[in-house]
Amino acid sequence: MVLLQYLMFRWVCMYMDIPVNMRNVSYFLYVFLYLKEDIYSFKTCLIWEELKKQLKCYGEYLVIISIIVYHTSGIDGLWKYLLLGTIAVVYSFVLAKLIRLIFGSYLKKNVVIVGVGSTAKDLGDIIYQNKFTMYNFLGYADVGKNKDVLVEKDEIIANRESLKEFIQNNRVREVIVALPNISNKDLNLVVDEFEDLVKRVKIVPKLHKMYTFNPEIQDYDGLLLISAKNNIMSLKRRILKRGFDICGALVGMLLLIPLYLKYGLQIKKDGGPVLFSHNRIGRDLKPFKMHKFRSMYIDAEERLEKMLAEDENLRQEFYTNFKLKDDPRITPAGAFLRRTSLDEFPQFINVLMGEMSLVGPRPVVQKEVDMYYGTEMGKKIFQVKPGITGMWQANGRSDVEDYDERIALDLYYIRNWSLWLDIIILIKTVKNVIGKKGAY
């Protein structure tokens, strides 16, 4: 990868007429930053972690090269080095992904998950779904510490007695212990069985669904402390989030204009307005009018009351999710807008007005707060603005039907908020929208 990066720097610098000495400075600066972030090691990580490292190197490069160029030749030609850095980070990220794909069979580490419960299954699903990782997942080991077996039987490759032999025979390099509720005594007994046979042991802690984003590990005189900051309460970070929202909303508004012109006439065919405004619960449980492209007939409420009165199954579905999968109230134009999630674009108006955020808890109606959240949990969740998208949309959208799970995802977001988490959620949401996952 180092050689391929050098060839890229050499070719781009020749094309942009950058002096050889500055080409070398730029190249070695990038190599140093990549070594500092340990990117060349191709360690096992999700694509988001890799992207974060690459962007961190990019930001540091821009700052350092700007200082160097300014003190050597002024601001003239600075744009060349900024463009070089942009090309370098895009090239390096694509190159890293290609290397993992092409040479994955040689770079991957054999890994086993110890555990067969819900945590182990979730972890295995993440590994299966993220092809960017450098794991060759062999299966699960049942060491008898899970009450319920939630993984497939054919995926269980060993028990406590055969695990050691399996590790030796299959050159297992890493073991992940996914038994968050196990006692320290039992955990020591399990790990003692194989820790001298593998290069690395990872342990999923009990609070894995609470604080997981950028925690700090401290050795407090022999005691393990996991430190997590409540970033959402920081005034500086709230200002940063608001600035990010405004920039995103302005871009969204530019996209909204052609959508309004294209679909406005189709929506107005039944004589109703193009936009539909609905009361939703906002920050501090204060109601606000959330805007969407109207996707239902103008007499939708009357139709809904009649349908719920006549059909018990529809009534149960509606009061579970507050929406219907095959909703006869939706217009033909509205069906397309919903399927593509284009009906959500007017919410950029709410973001610009400060009533919503690009990313936040799911905006709900008062009845949902009364039935599923309660006042205290509602206050906890809506201490922040609701978002156009959020954790539950990024993790399945309407497929996430359990309100307890939705609330847990929103709590996770509040506890672990960072601007980078917002970016990940936005990317995942776009991916789900393109794949039409959970959209109706």
Image (cartoon, helix red, strand yellow):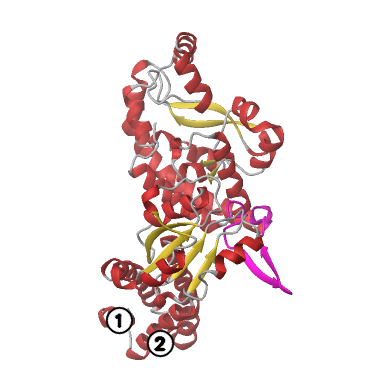
Does the magenta run of residues contain 225?
yes
* Quadrant that contains the N terminus: bottom left
* Quadrant that contains the C terminus: top left
Q: Which residue is mark 2?
A: 25
Does the magenta run of residues contain 369?
no
Q: Position of residue 333 (x, y in %)?
A: 32, 26
Q: CA distance from mark 1 to mark 2?
A: 12 Å
Q: Nearer the viewer, residue 137 or 140?
A: 140
Q: Residues within 10 Å of mark 1 (few under 14, many from 20)?
A: many
Q: Is residue 326 above or below residue 188?
A: above
Q: Is residue 142 left or right of residue 337?
A: right
Q: Nearer the viewer, residue 267 or 32?
A: 32
Q: Amino acid at mark 1?
A: Cys
In the rendered image, the residue lying farthest to the right is 221
Which residue is located at x 46 percent, y 60 percent? 113
Marks 1/2 in contact by CB < 8 Å: the verdict is no
Q: Position of residue 16 (x, y in %)?
A: 29, 79
Which residue is located at x 52 percent, y 34 percent? 402
Q: Which residue is mark 1?
A: 13
Helix, strand or loop at label 2? It is helix
Mark 1 or mark 2, which has the lower sequence index? 1
Q: Nearer the viewer, residue 290 or 6?
A: 6
Q: Nearer the viewer, residue 347 or 213?
A: 213
Q: Residues within 10 Å of mark 2 (few under 14, many from 20)?
A: some
Q: Position of residue 138 (x, y in %)?
A: 37, 61
